[in-house]
Structures are given as structure tokens and as C-alpha cells.
Image (cartoon, rainbow, N blue to C red):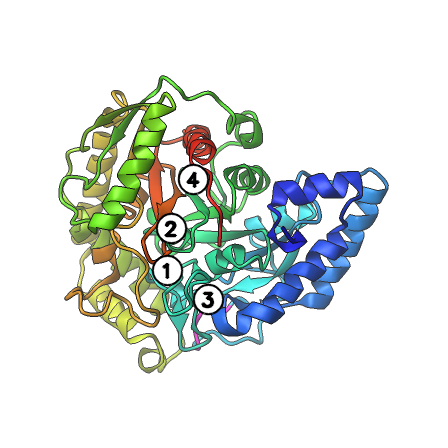
Amino acid sequence: MSHRELTASELVAAYATGELSPVEATADALQAIEERDGELNAYCLVDADRALEQAKAAEIRWRDGNPIGWLDGVPSSIKDMFLTAGWPTRRGSTSIPAEGPWDVDSPVMARMREAGLVVLGKTTTPEIAWKGVTDSALVGITRNPVDPSKTAGGSSGGSAAAVAADMGAISVGTDGGGSVRIPASFCGIVGLKPTHGRIPLFPASPFGPLSHAGPMARSVDDTALLLDVIATSDPRDPAALAPPVGTYREAVRRDVRGLIAAFSPTLGYVDVDPEVASIVAAAVKALDDAGLQIEQADPGFEDPKPSFDILWSTGAAKLLDSFPPGSEDRVDPGLRRVWEQGKTYSASDYLDATAARASLGILMGEFHTRYDVLITPTIPIPPFEAGHDVPPGSGLSEWPEWTPFTYPFNMTQQPAISVPAGRTSKGLPVGLQIVGPRHSDDLVLAVAKLLEEVRPWVVR
């Protein structure tokens, strides 16, 4: 195994012994970007000089025995939806000028700096992170490292592709309808959407109560370590939760054998690709054999897409209305349709959708009095051809139609993690989703860790 393939936890262990330095690890990650990103297009900005400066400072801290965090000196990246002082945040849009000024860090970026992470650059996003694949007029198509003819998923596809291709060990994405979990599933990595408010956001997202940030990594341990860094409160987010009690890096090792998990293969209404269904079912059986008590049960709700569409499109319309004149002709054509759709809804429509969201949350709250976690496929299909919003020839017209397992849990604001479950006969990754009650981020990480232990995967 080369240095660039080491997980963040393994890198830090090597820093501690002196076997490897943050400068060497950063140089390896930058070399991987040079070798692979021309094809994959995971980064929209790389700042090698700044990264190496950060790595040199981390190297000194490790040499002197004074690292400033559990991830000090680890090469990482951040999605181009987060404000980053000194770098433009264009959110995948040609309507957002690069000039700035860019002098404010988002809470996530501020915490990453404070913890000593080496941030290599910013990863790609579709325009304003609006869809489940990653392409834009600004930066082009982001491709899957496992098979570059396929999509990496989205909207955090750049982050997922970067992590899966060893172009940085960890990354942070955003998730308003599945945007961390979708590309994690498609690229064969781990992606967590924590409880809403667990990771502070600034400025506030136009998608409001749907919006989450989330850590992405090649292992569950790394995901927990990164969550420890970025899940600290920030006064600029009035919806932020109180700081967590304890650490996720310790909670991930909780013994979950004997807990009761509901396995819902279809949520009662989803058409799942047979090979995906078989792979997920085999992973669930492995969890059952390991001591997690599995019962097949559906939560009992109908597809909430109509309400999700209202919440999603009105948020998009509110943001896009602030764009410069003429933006209608420049934005992604699919986004323009969402913009126009959002303008048709009234305040009453929005409040009805908010009430439906609350009802769904109440139903899931009651469901979790009987089941500790819910397990589903992450995505009902394998990765499909890059450059398309929906699978070619599927007859579908909108991205949420092929992501029915993810967006309901943005509406309920529950923690949900995608972990690798296996690969198709063509070698394409398949993810399994674990959903827990609100505020049970530690529990979903621990169940994910159990799956990782009983069905270890290789991200290649």
C-alpha cells in the first residue's frame, strides 16, 4: 500500500511514530491530483503552495510532540459550497464572480484550520448543489474513480471522487436531499449526514431545514474523527445544536450487538435493481450474523417527494432570485426549471409541505421507539453514465426519482450514513444506508463500524 492510500487514522499513526511526515503525505496527495484529476475533475481549485505551507507547520508540531488535533496534518478537501477565506466560493455557478472579496471562513472551514488539517483545495459541485450528480457549466463533469465513464453522484461528487481516488484522505460535503450519501454510495466510500444542526452552517442555506453538512472518508473511524472536528458550535448558526457530549471517535466503538434494526428493502414503494437488492441483503445478513437483531419492517410512509419538491424548489428560487440579471439564461437548464417551479408555490403551499415534513418526523420518531436503527439501500441503482441528470433510457425526468431512499431523511433531519455494502458484477460500488433517531449520530456510526468489521471493503 502506498502512502497515498492510507486512511486519515493511519496517516496520523505514522506521523506519531515518525514513519511519515505531513509534508510527504501532502506531496503524495498533490501527486495523485496531478495524475488523476485531469480525468476525474474532482477539484475546482487546488492550492499546492498553501497546502505545503500548512503541511510544514504540521510537521513541526508532530516533530515537537505538540499536534493540535487528531487530524493534524491530514490532507483534506472541502466542497465549493463553503466559504473559505482567500479562495472564491462560486458554488458551481457562472453567475457568481470569482473576484470576491473572499475574507470569511464558514464554520466548517474555520474548524478544519483550527484542527491543523491540510486543505488541498475545493471540490466540485453542480450549480448551487441542486442535483444528485456533479456537473456544471462552470467546471464540467465530475467522474467516478471506479469507472470514469460513470457519474460520481452528487451533489458532493467532487468530494467523494477526491477521497476515493486518494486525492486527500477526507472531505466535507453538503447534503440537502442525499448529496453526501449518494456520491459516497456511487464511489464506494463512507458519507454521513448527521442530525440537522450538528454541524453549524454559515451563511444559512436557502434550503433551510433540509440542509446538512457531512464528513466523507474511506473508513468509519475517519468519518467519526472528522465529525469531532467540525461538529463544534458556532454563534453564526442559530439552528446549531449544543456541543456533543463525549467524542465520536470513542462512540464509534460502542457495542451494538443485541440492538434491534429494521431492514426495509424498498421503504414499501421503491423499485430496486435486483443486483443492488441482493448485495444489500447480503450485507444485512452479515450484520444479523454478527449479533444485530434484524427484523424486516417498513416505516409505513408514502413517498414524500411532492412535499420535498416544494421545499427544495422554493429554496432554490429564493436563492436564484438574488442572482444577477440575465442569470436565467446562464444557469443549468434543469435548475432553471426548478427555479420556475419554485416561483409557482404560495406561502400556504410551503407551510403545507412543512407540516408534511413534521408529520414524517413524528412517524419516524415513533418508529424508532421500536427499532434502534433503520437500514435501507442508499441508492436503488448502480452508478450510471456521467453527464446525465437521470439514468439514460430510464424514462425518469428528475433526480429525486432515482434517490428515493435519501431525501426523506433530510425532511426528518435524522442522521443517516452510507457505507459500502459490496460491488456489482461490473465492479461498481453499492452503498447501504443506516438511519437513526435524531441526535443518535453516535449510534449510526457504531452500526456502520460493525458492518465495516464484518464485511471489510477496499476502496478501489
Q: Quick one: 382 or 163, which is closer to the camera?
A: 382
Q: Amino acid at mark 4?
A: Pro
Mark 4 closeness class: few <14, some 14–19, many ≥20 residues within 10 Å:
many
Give coordinates of residue 266: x percent, y percent: 19, 42
Q: The residue under label 2 is which amino acid type?
A: Ser
Provide the secondary structure element on which disc 4 rests. loop
Q: Which numbered disc, 1 or 4, marks the residue that appears first in the sequence? A: 1
Q: Comparing marks 3 and 1, which lies closer to the viewer?
A: 1
Tell me which label, 3 or 1, sits earlier in the chain: 3
Q: Which residue is mark 2?
A: 185
Per the model, the C-alpha gap separating discs 4 and 2 is: 16 Å
Residue assigned mark 1: 153
Q: For the residues marked 3 and 1, what is the alpha-carbon distance in whole angstroms?
A: 16 Å
How far across and how far down the image is residue 241, in percent?
Answer: 47, 35
Q: Are marks 4 and 3 in contact (CB under 8 Å)?
A: no
**For the point 50% across and 63% down, which residue is it?**
80
Mark 4 or mark 2, earlier in chain? 2
Viewer-side label of 3, 2: 2
Q: Which mark is residue 194?
A: 4
